[in-house]
Image (cartoon, rainbow, N blue to C red):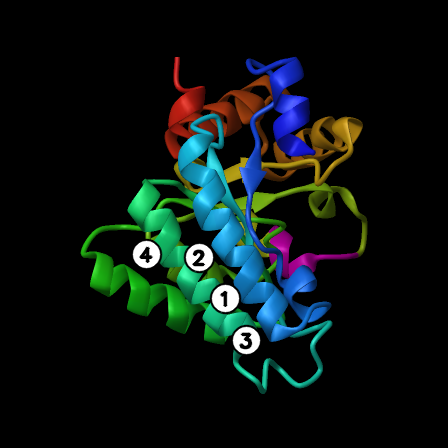
Amino acid sequence: AQLGLSALDPDLIKPVLGLHPWWVLEHREQECWAALGELEALLPAHPQVVALGELGLDFFRDKTKDASGLQKAILGRQLVLASELGLPLVLHVVHAHEVALEVLSAHQKKRGRPLQGLVHAFSGSYEIAQEYLKLGLKLSVGPGLAEPGRHKQLKSAFVRLKPEDWVLESDGKGPELLRAAGAAALLLQKEVDWVLEHSSQNVAQVFKSLRK
């Protein structure tokens, strides 16, 4: 579906493909590896794909915390695939930061250079944020910044980050991006245009095809 939409307006719609941890949880192991094989065959033929994702770990939906190791294994193989193709990552990590950071750190060491990509819908602490940043990743934050009385940990972390550490996201709803930008501007005591400009610059650093 993403590839079809991208064909309608290649300059505006940039596809990101990967095996989401929710999808992995809903399918048998054999189906997961078969789908990964299809993804590996598909990607080289579609240079318009700008990143691999969402990929990652979700222990909120998986109460066993990936006892079978399938989520972790699929994540690991996708990290190798992204590295082989030179694609940045769009990571989905929920209630699994410790394990995700272990996997990412091990991959980064084998790779021998910083990772490239985003931690989607980040809502963790400043300390966790620093661990992702050390690996070369950026933090993608969204409308949670605008929710009064909620996401205090995220807001506390966000104001301590450097301008080059984060990007803004809508998580699927266009107007939510402006809402997030307004909240970020208030937290940082900056103008909304400043926030949007820095976000755009940081996105362009991650996704090569978006660079001017």
Residue marked by disc 2: 78
Amino acid type of the residue that numbered disc 3 sits on in the rendered structure? Leu
Q: Which residues make up the magenta segment?
A: 150-155
The Cα–Cα distance between marks 3 and 2, rounded to whole angstroms, is 12 Å
Instruction: Provide residue 141's location: percent of width, then percent of height.
Output: 61, 44
Q: In which quarter of the view is residue 132 placed?
A: bottom left
Q: Secondary structure at mark 1?
A: helix
Q: Is residue 149 left or right of residue 211?
A: right
Q: Is residue 29 left or right of residue 209?
A: right
Residue marked by disc 1: 74
Residue 71 covered by magenta stretch: no
Question: Disc number at residue 70?
Answer: 3
Amino acid type of the residue that numbered disc 4 sits on in the rendered structure? Lys
The reply to whether the C-beta atoms of the residues labelled 3 and 2 are less than 8 Å apart is no
The Cα–Cα distance between marks 1 and 4, rounded to whole angstroms, is 23 Å
Residue marked by disc 4: 134
Q: Tell which tag, 1 or 4, sits nearer the viewer.
A: 1
Task: Tell me what residue is drawn at x 30 percent, y 48 percent.
Answer: 84
- Above or below, comparing residue 32 to residue 70 in the picture: above
The answer to whether residue 90 is seen in the rendering is no
> Counting residues from the N terminus, which is met first, the one under dot 4 or under dot 2?
2
The Cα–Cα distance between marks 4 and 3, rounded to whole angstroms, is 26 Å
> Counting residues from the N terminus, which is met first, the one under dot 1 or under dot 4?
1
